[in-house]
Amino acid sequence: MQTSDLIKIATTAPSADNSQPWQFSASPEGIVCRYKDRAVKQDPFGPLGHGTLMSAGALLENINTLCPRQAAPPQLSIDAARWSIVTDFSAWPDSPDSAIVNLLSSRHTNRHPFAALPTQPIGNVKHAFSTQIITLTAAESIRRLANALTDCSIARFNDQELHEWLFSSLRWTPTEVDSGTGLDLKTLHLPPGGRQFMQWIAPWERMKLLNRFGIYRILAAADSALFRQAPGVMAFVGGQTPKDVLECGQLMQRTWLALNAQGIAVHPYYALTDLGNRLRQKKLDGRWAAKIQGAQTMAAEVLQLGRDEQVHMLFRIGTPRQIPVRSKRLPVTAFMEASLGV
Ligand SMILES: Cc1cc2nc3c(=O)[nH]c(=O)nc-3n(C[C@H](O)[C@H](O)[C@H](O)COP(=O)(O)O)c2cc1C
């Protein structure tokens, strides 16, 4: 297998709005992967933002899974400006196990309704990360987390930056979808007429006007409706240093791979984390501060978080009822700098 084939499999890793914020290059130490902003508008996370680090962790997990027998494991470094993952050239296998390729390429997001979880217990993934997973199946705990999520979605639908970023990520036509960037509208679970509605609310000025009549309440309720009825929820929680977040991305990916391999569907929800981070970073419109603080407190109570812990990601899980359309990826050459011989 060529390096490009391995990079193609590694970059099946998930990223917020399928932003794929990675670039590979060659260096004397080996193959280096670093942050790259591919957003049409500016990436709201940046090189060391939470969403970027979660995706970098997922990518590192893929690289580790692809290169299982390494004399020297990939070297992760995070400094004040950026993260990088360096893999020795000799560590990349000539031909990875087809079961591993299948495992990584089969992982995906499913935003449709789910049926009950299988009766046998969901196997725990083995790990030594500082972060942990809390699995909830009790309807009352899920309902309380759903309330916290709805409150965060309310603030989210009132935020111009988040609105414009989402709409700049949506891909409407076959040509746009084939570019391999962003979110194909068909990957979303929209009701009849949903596509036209989304097109209508795309301009922020219109959304702002509709928000005066409370449309954000309806959208936030719709956004968390399937979460409220979820057969199960997984919360990824832990400390708040960049290393903690990146490790949580690794744990998220390891869990996601294992769940999909067991036939369990996964739908990630990031609004609770993102709005909580915006509150802490003072990037949130003051109107929503009390609501978001309340949502974070509620989630901390349900999940019994320690003082320095936060929720890094929520998964809605269940048995799939529908096979979803899958998000595409950029052509692999877009991830490779000229130093890698493309
Ligand atoms: C940090 C992060 C945040 C995400 N947030 C959400 C979310 O709030 N809602 C959602 O439906 N998908 C979310 N996703 C899933 C991505 O949109 C998805 O992974 C990406 O579009 C690629 O699709 P795939 O997972 O099917 O490969 C998130 C993924 C990551 C890594």
Image (cartoon, rainbow, N blue to C red):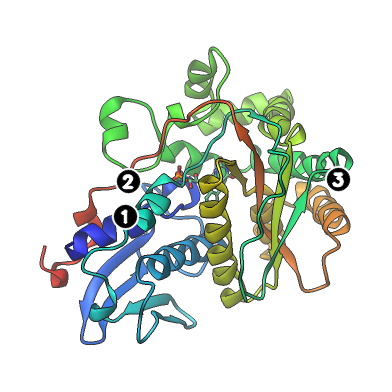
Question: Is 198 drawn above or below residue 28 in the view shown?
Answer: above
Q: Which mark is residue 329?
A: 2
Q: Residue at x 49, y 66 (%)?
A: 57
Q: Position of residue 335 (x, y in %)?
A: 26, 59
Farthest-out residue, top: 192
Query: In terms of depth relative to the viewer, which is nearer, 317 or 161?
Result: 317
The mark nearer the N terminus, 3 or 2, is: 3
- Circle 1: element type: helix
Let me know if residue 11 appears in the view.
Answer: no
Q: Residue at x 35, y 86 (%)?
A: 71
- Circle 3: element type: helix
- Quarter of the image with the C terminus is bottom left
Using a 10 Å C-alpha cutoff, classify the residue at mark 3 as few (fewer than 14 neighbours), some (14 to 19) or many (20 or more).
Answer: some
- Hey, what amino acid is under mark 2? Arg
Farthest-out residue, front: 120
- Hey, what amino acid is under mark 1? Ser
